[in-house]
Image (spheres, rainbow, N blue to C red):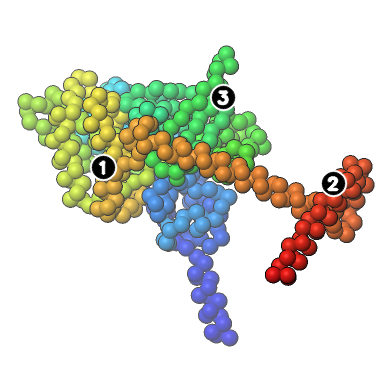
Amino acid sequence: MLSRWMSGSSRSLEREYNCTVRLLDDSEYSCTIQRDAKGQYLFDLLCHHLNLLEKDYFGIRFVDPDKQRHWLEFTKSVVKQMRAQPPFTMCFRVKFYPTDPAALKEEITRYLVFLQIKRDLYHGRLLCKTSDAALLAAYILQAEIGDYDPGKHPEGYSSKFQFFPKHSEKLERKIAEIHKTELSGQTPATSELNFLRKAQTLETYGVDPHPCKDVSGNAAFLAFTPFGFVVLQGNKRVHFIKWNEVTKMKFEGKTFYLYVSQKEEKKIVLTYFAPTPEACKHLWKCGIENQAFYKLEKSSQVRTVSSSNLFFKGSRFRYSGRVAKEVMESSAKIKREPPEIHRAGLVPSRSCPSITHGPRLSSVPRTRRRAVHISIMEGLESLRDSAHSTPVRSASHGEALAARGARADSSERVAVIADENYSPADSVLPTPVAEHSLELLLLARHLNGAPCSIEEEKEAEASTPTAAEAAEPPGPRALGPGGAAQAPQVNKFVLSVLRLLLVTVGLLFVLLLLLIVLTESDLDTAFFRDIRQTPEFEQFHYQYFCPLRRWFACKIRAVVSLLIDT
């Protein structure tokens, strides 16, 4: 009896898994889930821990063993989705940015969205002009340290926070000036609300960049926002397509297709190439979910979407949550006492580290303090490392310092941007250069991976790449759409033809089996009886099938007799 109880206890323990979820304020929530627990169960545990009711805007993100990022699907088992050894590590993040964050019902929801956008600002996903950047940073400062106090805040106090990937002393002074003169008296909740209102007006609000290449081989970033589909190249938005103009999204391998129907019945198809098939599938699923959430009126209108054409194998996916309109209607019905909010305050965080972790103009020689040197490769890697959906790779601390030093040396030869014209956007989405060799090098580094930031290294827990992985050359598409890229296109056509032939033969085989059952079996079901009694079937049976059967029987007997004689 005792051994049976112990064996049963050991089996129950094997079905339990430890999970750690990193929250937006960089704290961690740990729990234990059963083997068959769905994603919805874990998400509900988190929302209960956070006292969050407007939870449809949020999601759980994780990284698979191949370093590809995913959003946890709530209708599927957590363990089966992770495909990794426990304990599991995930991140709680904003998945669907509110169309109007200031209109959120509860302050706790606005605070969480504020933390997410603050992370976006630091990691370079939220691009803005210098004046807007200074105002956003001042709002953060006011929310975290309160009113300016000369006794507590000495000269240069704003430099203790790094709000952007790069910034200058002039920008720091502008932030401190706004904080001192314009925001006095604002509570943390008011500053956060003003921050959200300002961030919502920026073009890259809600951008979750997916690195891709267009048909010409140029690097681009695709993103889905509350208002539509966005394509970024360099530091410019080259395409913006509203959700009601997007008619279809599909993918085949690494190729992503976006079908657009604009005014005057003008139809276009945008084609982009993702780094891997897994990244392309993740891009497609994100597009399907965002379109359903922002475009549809009711969740009952959601349909299962297939990534393939008729007769061809493909992925099927269905968005399982509520849509934005339903979420807003449900939020309006919330009636409870506002929950208590525990703000992080001045506690250092990965999303807002000390200024010593980033470049400062004070480290530049006095004769060059009026210029900011920005490496194009470093800028592009900065966005790649901070993107939600990009596979990441880590490197040792020594390798990272060596790589930064090499990029710093090359930056003086790449671009020099005057301090007066400086914008955080310049260091994140640089304008592509004309030199062909540099562009190929940039794309090769982008595809093969580079040392990632401390934040993304901790989130992804990526292992150091081997020498073979680091030296692996880029695929054919890194050399442009021509040349070696022709071979995959031919192979796709041949595979499509073979699939069509295979499906045709399979259908003919099924029809032959059905015909044999109708003519030779004794099954007397209503379905078969109705078919057998039709004049057309009787004519086919006596005029064609019976003579054909006698002919086959005769041939078989002749072959058998020939074999017996020999």
Instruction: Give the residue number, with chain letter if any, for mark 3.
Output: 244
| Label 3 SS | helix
Q: Residue at x 32, y 25 (%)?
A: 235
Residue 155 location, quadrant = top left
What is the quadrant of the C terminus in the image? bottom right
Q: Residue at x 73, y 50 (%)?
A: 510
Judged from this view, the residue extending furthest toward the top is 264
Instruction: Give the residue number, with chain letter if any, for mark 1.
Output: 353
Mark 1–mark 3 contact, CB under 8 Å? no
Residue 392: x %, y % from top left: 34, 46
What is the quadrant of the N terminus in the image? bottom right
Residue 123 location, quadrant = top left
Q: Badge 1: how crowded within 10 Å, few (<14), some, or many (20+)?
A: some
Of the image marks 1 and 3, the number of the one nearer the N terminus: 3
Q: How far apart in space, not on screen, are marks 1 and 3 (Cα)?
A: 40 Å
Left or right side of 416 for 314:
right
Q: How far apart in space, not on screen, are marks 3 and 2 (Cα)?
A: 55 Å
Mark 1–mark 2 contact, CB under 8 Å? no
